[in-house]
Image (cartoon, helix red, strand yellow):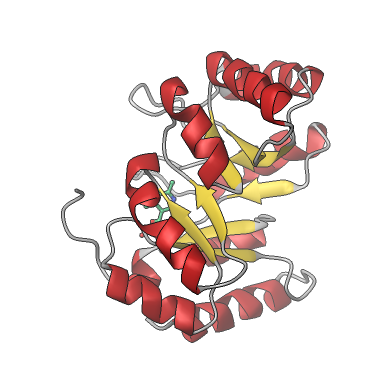
Amino acid sequence: MSLVEIQTRIAAAEAAHDRPKGQVKLIAVSKVQPNARVKQVLEQGQRVFGENRVQEAAGKWPDFRKRFDAIDLHLLGPLQTNKARQAAELFDVIHSLDRPKLATALARLAQETGRCPDLFIQINTGKEMQKAGIMPEDADAFIASCSAMDLPVRGVMCIPPVDETPALHFALLAKIAHRNGLSGLSMGMSADFEMAIGFGATHVRVGSAIFGARGAPK
Ligand SMILES: *Cc1c(COP(=O)(O)O)cnc(C)c1O
């Protein structure tokens, strides 16, 4: 599907749910896509991109940034503490703040460097063992502890279980954001971004619907 089609579908979902036009940010998830495809999407004017791995992003985005202005780069995948410094330098936004140790590391870096990417706290809405994220019942306390560290928390993020309808997860994430006074809601992927917009998503993360199916991860 083309970038324009996705933009059109986002605009239609905004209108259908009485959301202000242009409120939803489209993150084009470019992980494991060939550079030539990413370049095409840049040439079509897209500037907001998402990557899963620090290493992979470090291999392609510094070069794209030399050739294209105003790139807004979002980290979506798990972040090891020992890569926090590199991630904080490379990314504008991190969606995967998922544990106290990482919060402490980012706060220390922010003190040292005077800057920090905008942050989304990943919530494990499905309470899945194998999935990263703060458990829903721990979310309020964790958000408060991040605020106490002066971290720039903008919102919450979730990846619903693959075998469940995402609606309940989107609703739960929206509730957590609302009661904590956070405006950012990072939810919705290729298969369900319109539904996520119905539940208030401000950031949708769309990969395969724009770029085509991904090959095996590198
Ligand atoms: C890969 C990925 C996406 C995009 O998934 P698609 O189904 O290709 O749209 C979104 N969010 C996260 C966290 C991802 O890892």
Q: Where 183 falls versus 88 (above or below)?
A: below
Residue 208 screen position, x and y as percent = 34, 66
Q: Where 159 falls versus 205 (above or below)?
A: above
Look at the image and tell me in which quarter the N terminus lies.
Answer: bottom left
Residue 80 screen position, x and y as percent = 41, 25
Residue 125 seen: no
Which one is in front, 7 or 59? 59
Quarter of the rendering containing residue 168: top right
Disc count in the image?
Answer: 0
Q: Residue at x 39, y 26 (%)?
A: 128
Which one is in front, 14 or 151? 151
Q: Residue at x 56, y 37 (%)?
A: 88
Residue 167 screen position, x and y as percent = 54, 50
Q: Residue at x 72, y 69 (%)?
A: 17
Whether residue 124 sits left or right of residue 213 in the image: it is right
Whether residue 151 sits left or right of residue 65 in the image: it is right
Whether residue 200 sits left or right of residue 56 in the image: it is right
Q: Residue at x 61, y 21 (%)?
A: 103
Q: Where 50 falls versus 8 (above or below)?
A: above
